[in-house]
Amino acid sequence: MRRSIKKVAAGLLATMMIGTMLTGCGGGNKKDSGSSKKETSEINIGFSQVGAESDWRVANTKSMKSALTAKNGFKLSFADAQQKQENQTKAVREFITQGVDVIAIAPVTETGWETVLKEAKKADIPVITVDRQIKTSDDSLITAWVGSDFKKEGVKAAEWLIKEKGKEKGDVNIAVLQGTIGSSAEIGRTKGFKEGIKDQKNFKIIASQTGEFTQAKGQEVMESFLKQNKDIDVVVAQNDNMAFGAIDALKAAGKTPGKDVTIISFDAIKAALKKVQSGEINAEFECNPLHGPRVAELAKKIMKGEKVDKIQYVDEQVFTKDNTTKEVINKRAY
Ligand code: GYE
């Protein structure tokens, strides 16, 4: 990889300059020392995180921070974008100015990245995307991505609901609490679910709005759904925190979540699995946030000039009351 060669060269140059300063004469040909030393030295990595909007995100941050440690060979610059893409662009520019070795981005939305990524490429800094994805016209702007197949999660949710309610005679009214519009998680889950139910004539999506992946907004949007539509049969919350908000809104409206209204959610954090067990959430579609170790491994390989897989999906499960045992909940790492 060009960058690691550059880094080795920089190391050599620095060694030569120090040598020059110490001996006080130029032209000495004290080569070497550099390469192996530089290769094992710490990797400066800048990570631009979406924010702290959900428990999933908090678990993701924790995973990244505990993998990208000094002990593991990293120097991490962490920037929280507070769910705003302009903050991410700023953070990435700062990483470039700092001259980090690798940039990791968990992007808020998929679009709007072209310019800043070109700047990173010009500075010869590889970019790894984490969790959500980035859409670019130029493939070479991203070295690797690790995350979930959000569309598949949406399809699985549709398949589960068809098994559950597909044979009902009347209409099945569905309300969707979407995540941040334009984020991969929202795009994929919306698309997968819609495609999955398209032949199911009695399934009607009667309301759909973003709750920004937060509990407070999820509750607020659910309250307004309930004001407009009295007979909602199913709530599809595109993450657990919005599901928690929706559950509160339903209870306040005198409805029993999980019974009067079927609740489907994504992420499968520990607190949500407890609600599956107690019956307030009917089905959970897992989304694994523990990307830290994978990103660390990718960064190390990239810095050594090794080839890496451009796309890495993680395996995910479905949880319903049948398989959400006490042991499963106790073992849950997030
Ligand atoms: O589902 C949600 C978080 O992008 C997969 O973002 C992630 C989503 C996750 O806020 O809880």
Image (cartoon, helix red, strand yellow):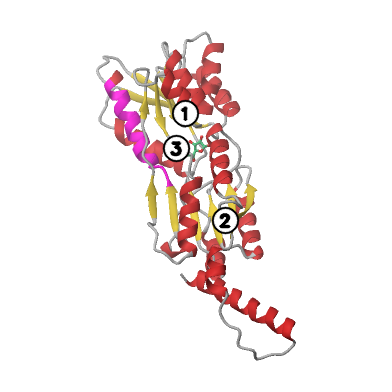
Give the residue pinned by disc 1: 332
Give the residue pinned by disc 3: 288
Q: Find residue 169 and report its image quarter.
A: top left
Percent across and percent down for residue 293 are 48, 47
Circle 1: element type: loop
Q: Hey, what amino acid is under mark 3?
A: Asn
Q: Nearest the camera: 315 or 328?
A: 328
Q: Hey, what amino acid is under mark 2?
A: Gly
Residue at 43%, 18% in the rendered image: 326
Percent across and percent down for residue 254 are 52, 8
Percent across and percent down for residue 211 are 54, 31
Of discs 1 and 3, which sits in the foreground?
1
Q: How far apart are marks 2 and 1 (CA)?
A: 28 Å
Q: Which span is picked out in magenta? A: 147-163
Give the residue pinned by disc 2: 73
On screen, residue 29 above or below 1: below
